[in-house]
Image (spheres, grey):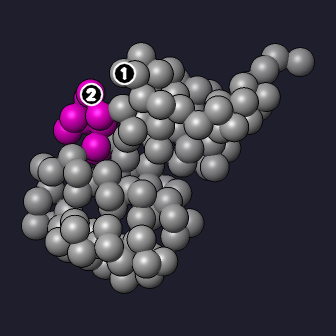
């Protein structure tokens, strides 16, 4: 089910992808990949609260999954939690995740002390 959701997401059919990812996560609740894909889908459709929950689930299921920390940082940033985003991006960095430099700069600008 994750594969079908990924294909739909690549085709720009976010709502349909979300439906597939929900079903996959329900069928495999302990799958970090399913939680991650569902978190990304929620993020892409603007549901940051649910995206954060799913991405946090992903990091609990697979603490070494660097991209999940980066996506969690992005969702937290979009929700206005810049400190939380900063913490998550540091974990992603420590795990060797290739970070988006524009996002890192935007986060640094938001968390910089005046």
How many C-alpha atoms fall within 10 Å of the one at disc 2: few (<14), some, or many (≥20)?
some
Estimate the x, y position of residue 84 in percent, counting from the top left.
Answer: 55, 31
Residue linked to disc 1: 95
What residue lies at 56% left-to-right and 66% top-to-bottom? 46
What residue lies at 36% left-to-right and 77% top-to-bottom? 8
Quadrant of residue 112 within the rendered picture = top right
Measure how far apart labels 1 and 2 are at the Cα level. 7 Å
Residue 77 shown left or right of residue 3 in the figure: right
Element on which disc 1 rests: loop
What residue lies at 81% left-to-right and 17% top-to-bottom? 113
Vertical order, 23 against 64 (above or below): below
Element on which disc 2 rests: loop
Residue toward you, 11 or 71: 11
Residue 34 shown left or right of residue 83 in the figure: left
Q: Which residues are magenta?
A: 57-65
Question: In what quadrant of the picture does the C terminus appear?
Answer: top right
Estimate the x, y position of residue 19 in percent, counting from the top left.
Answer: 31, 78
Asked whether residue 49 is drawn in magenta, I would say no
Residue toward you, 49 or 69: 69
Looking at the image, do the residues carrying marks 1 and 2 touch, with CB atoms under 8 Å apart?
Answer: yes
Residue 28 shows which numbered tag? none
Vertical order, 44 against 51 (above or below): below
Residue toward you, 84 or 69: 69
Estimate the x, y position of residue 34 in percent, counting from the top left.
Answer: 23, 57
Estimate the x, y position of residue 57 in percent, counting from the top left.
Answer: 28, 44
Residue linked to disc 2: 64
């Amino acid at each position: 089910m994750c594969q079908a959701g990924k294909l739909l997401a690549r085709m720009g059919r976010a709502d349909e992808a979300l439906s597939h990812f929900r079903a996959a996560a329900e069928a495999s609740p302990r799958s970090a990949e399913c939680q991650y894909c569902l978190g990304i889908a929620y993020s892409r459709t603007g549901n940051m609260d649910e995206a954060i929950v799913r991405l946090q689930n992903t990091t609990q299921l697979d603490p070494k999954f660097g991209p999940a920390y980066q996506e969690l940082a992005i969702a937290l940033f979009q929700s206005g939690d810049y400190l939380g985003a900063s913490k998550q991006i540091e974990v992603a960095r420590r795990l060797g995740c290739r970070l988006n430099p524009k996002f890192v700069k935007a986060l640094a600008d938001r968390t910089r002390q005046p």
